[in-house]
Image (tube, rainbow, N blue to C red):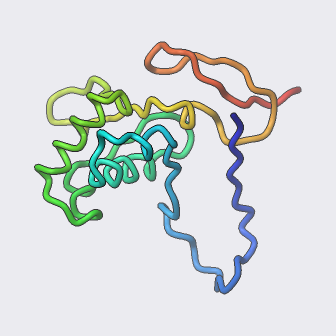
Amino acid sequence: MSLYVDHTGEPQVDHTGEPLPRWAYARIPREVVCDATLKMLDVRVYCMLAGSVWQGTTAKIGTRLIATCIHASRRLVIESLHRLEERGHIRRAAVRRGQRETFVLTSLVFGQKQRAGVEEVISSPSKGRRFASVRTA
């Protein structure tokens, strides 16, 4: 599996040159979209997690911000996070009390670095195997 995302800074169609928003898109794995046991709100919560991930697998985003952006209550967002964790789409990383929670997205889509090159197996924070593209010297 290979993904390549690149923005060269060249003007897009009807783009006037102002900086693009930080979260212009989110990569959503097919296994999340096609999971019939998830509610639509769960997929939207996953979109918010995926939107905050660029390189790597971890997302640090608060439940209040997620709730505000997707127009849902914080309680429903927390329930969605529990469902996503139960289905194995995310994993909660250990944090100390009072710190923002960190979520690890378990899909191989996020384990792969975003550049062309040779794919190799690397270690991930969950001690599992992931694919990554690395430059050849």
Q: Quadrant of the N terminus?
A: top right
In the displayed structure image, the side of residue 126 where residue 75 appears, left or right: left
Q: Quadrant of the C terminus?
A: top right
Residue displayed at 17% across by 44% down: 78
Residue displayed at 51% across by 42% down: 29
Q: How many numbered marks have been drawn onto this rendered protein structure?
A: 0
Whether 74 is drawn above or below 90: the answer is below
Furthest-right residue in this view: 137
Residue displayed at 65% across by 81% down: 17
Which of the pair 91/96 is nearer the observer?
A: 91
Quarter where residue 122 is shown? top right
Which of the pair 16/133 is nearer the observer?
A: 133
Q: Position of residue 86 (x, y in %)?
A: 26, 28
Which of the pair 8/116 is nearer the observer?
A: 116
Furthest-left residue in this view: 75
Q: Position of residue 37 (x, y in %)?
A: 29, 39
